[in-house]
Amino acid sequence: MTPLTLEWLMTKIELTVDGAAVSDDVEPRMLLVQYLREKLGKTGTVIGCDTSNCGACTVHLNGTSVKSCNVLAVQANGSTVTTIEGLADAAEGELHPVQEAFRECHGLQCGFCTPGMIMQAVDLLAENPSPTEEEVRLGMEGNLCRCTGYHNIVKSVLHAAGQTEGAKA
Amino acid sequence: MIPVKFDYLAPTSLEEALSALSEHGDDAKILAGGQSLLPVLRMRLNAPEVVIDLGGIDSLRGIRDDGDAIVIGAMTTHHVVRDHELVREHALLLSKAAAEVADSQIRHRGTFGGALAHADPAGDLGAPALALGAQFVIQGSGGTRTVEADDFFVDLFETAIGDDEILTEVRIPKHTGWGAHYEKFVRVAHQWPIVAVAATVKGSIDEARIGLTNMGSTPLRARATEAALAGASATEDGVRAAAEQAAEGTNPPTDLNGAADYRQHLARVLTGRAVLRAAGAA
């Protein structure tokens, strides 16, 4: 029998988070969102429903959006993770164009869902740079806003899409 | 919510995974994309001692052409299935259904094989796989076997996969150029369907294949409607008349989302819609 010690339960992971290489021993049952918040202090990523419904914990794993409460930290071993904190160079006071659009269009009320909304919007626009309003609503279906501020959220994403186009032209 | 403690194994080959599975047997759980397993673990509905993660086995990913079939690796994500050229050309119904699984974030992680092995009767991929006559390639320490779709789904959350076996790939006979539509009826955008209908038709209409989601403990075929549609023309009246038989032989659940007779009503209405859209007539 393998002895049931803490050491036995720990697994080493190495990954890149918001541009920095990190390495830790974690319990296999630790969720990626817990790892980001509790081990790395990246509390910009929030836990909303804790049932993989609301999307507040959305981050990018190897470039695509995932719900970080529904991924184990050990599954992210060897991967690249981007959180809301690494989207733009915050130290330089910069905002990502999608963050800027949410500010411009008042795409939030209480703001709790906003980190996840923005991370999903960035993913959506990467796949479809000029979405229709319906495509935005469908693409954001995994993110819930309990203030029901959807109107301005959709407006923000469409605004960001326009900006992206403007930048390209 | 935090799962109970478990040991974690990350094999990098199928052989390693199979040997870990035969060593730990009943105490082990296979982790594919984890989009159904992790909620189950967090709610502590299951408490495996060992979790075997297939994420590091590259050979289980990808879609290839194999003559009269396309072959989808079990660890291929819904996102990839939805957009893949081979799927769109030869099994459009799967592309349509994969697009309706949960939401974008879940589709990036959730896998084709994982969802089918989980065998949730409300899952979106069982009905289209059944309708297309999928063949399930299952590997164990004793070798490889192929199970037909009619025999794969055994009961609620139960398939033909044995305790010491892993679903490695799914063969989908080519339905090149067939029209397809997945009609999903939900209360909340990204949730499981209350009822859904997967329909694919050749011409309008030489042949029809129809799968029903959440109309019993396993995905079901609407065979009476399929028979009535063969050789029929895709008129609204004709299709709706054939769809009246769609709930025959079903045994849907009654729950907070709807009673069994309501689900049977939905199956008839949604089958009409799905077939008309698949035939390009709506």
Image (cartoon, coloured by chain):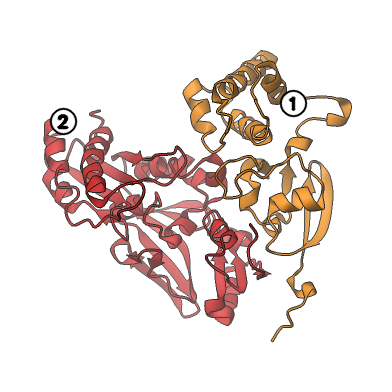
The residue that label 1 is drawn on is: A96
Chain A is which colour?
A: orange
Residue neighbourhood size for the residue with mark 1, other residues' Cα within 10 Å, grouped as few (<14), some (14–19), many (≥20): some
The residue that label 2 is drawn on is: B236
Q: Position of residue B24 (x, y in %)?
A: 58, 79
- The amino acid at mark 2 is Glu
Q: Quadrant of residue A111?
A: top right
In front here: B208 or B7?
Answer: B7
Report the side of A42 relative to B223 (left or right): right
Chain B is which colour?
A: red
Residue drawn at (38%, 52%) of the image: B122
Residue drawn at (64%, 53%) of the image: A71
In front here: B227 or B39?
Answer: B39
The chain identifier of the residue carrying mark 1 reads A
Q: Is residue B209 visible?
A: no
- The amino acid at mark 1 is His
Instruction: Quote the CA–CA distance across marks 2 and 1.
Output: 50 Å
At mark 1, the secondary structure is loop
Q: Is residue A117 above or below residue B64?
A: above
Report the side of A165 relative to B60 (left or right): right
Q: Quadrant of residue B10?
A: bottom right
Report the side of A158 relative to B137 (left or right): right
Q: Quadrant of residue B136?
A: bottom left
Report the side of A32 relative to B40 (left or right): right
Q: Position of residue B200 (x, y in %)?
A: 27, 43
The chain identifier of the residue carrying mark 2 reads B
At mark 2, the secondary structure is helix
Q: Are marks 2 and 1 in contact (CB under 8 Å)?
A: no
Q: Position of residue B163 (x, y in %)?
A: 47, 76
Q: Is residue A143 above or below residue A81?
A: above
Tell me the tag on residue A109. Answer: none
